[in-house]
Amino acid sequence: MTPSPLLRPAELAAYGPLPAPAGHTDAELTSLLRLLSTGRPRIHTVAVGHSRDDASRAAAEAFTEAWRARGGAVLAVVDWPEQAASWLRPARGGGGPPPPAGVVAAPPRARGHQAPRRGHSTGWSPARTFGFAALAEPRAVALAGPDTVDGLRGATADGGSWEIRHGWQVTPLPPSDGGGR
């Protein structure tokens, strides 16, 4: 896999190669839907962003279809090349407030270079962002930098969930029985 052009060789050497994009699981999709459906305030509208690899595209499509089938609204589905600074500007339609929640399907390398720029150049908040399992890769979190992804949450492949706490620590949470998180 070609490394991201936005990660410096020294960064890649320090953290080692990041995993290639992997396909999502049904349990992962169910967990992600549950995370968005059980929070307070209730989330109805989301923006979906994804990398242009096949696994990320398929995950975004599966989420969008399932979210709409549950009666949820999808403000926009936006993809980005590795060099993109942000997917939130196009997702907002140019200037309005950020959506109540964002869902991200991307390989770990995308997290390492996009989070710092989103936080500085948009109204993006990691606390309003949910992701598939790939985004919980600890090396990608470290590449994003301290505190840039604090509060980001997502689903694990086995139906559990994860949350980034204390600025950098990926905390896994066991699969839920369907109740709150």
Image (tube, helix red, strand yellow):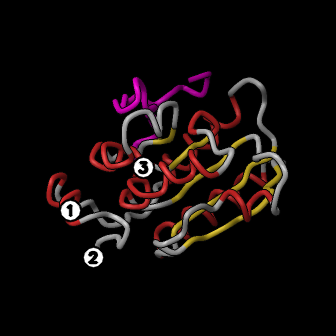
* SS class, disc 3: helix
Secondary structure at badge 2 equals loop
Residue identified by numbered label 1:
17
Q: x and y percent of residue 122 in the render?
A: 66, 50
Where is residue 150 shown, x and y percent of the image? 47, 32
What residue is drawn where x is 71% and y is 60%?
Answer: 89
Q: Quadrant of residue 156?
A: top left
**In magenta segment, residue 176:** yes
Q: Residue at x 49, y 50 (%)?
A: 115
Marks 1 & 2, CB-CB < 8 Å contact: yes
Overall secondary structure of the magenta section: loop
Work out how far the residue at label 3 is from the one at label 1, CA to CA, in angstroms. Answer: 15 Å
Q: Which residue is mark 3?
A: 135
x, y (%) of residue 37?
71, 35
First along the sequence among labels 3 and 1: 1
Checking the image for residue 1, the label placed there is 2
Query: Residue drawn at (67%, 67%), measured in percent from left and top?
Result: 78
- Near mark 3 (Cα within 10 A), the count class, few <14, some 14-19 or many ≥20, is many
Mark 2 or mark 3, earlier in chain: 2
Q: Amino acid at mark 2?
A: Met
Work out whether mark 1 precedes mark 2 in sequence or the reverse, and give the earlier one. 2
User: Taking 115 as reference, is 36 left or right?
Assistant: right
Number of numbered discs on residues: 3
> Relative to residue 143, is residue 77 depicted above or below?
below
Residue 174 seen in render = no
Q: Residue at x 76, y 62 (%)?
A: 76
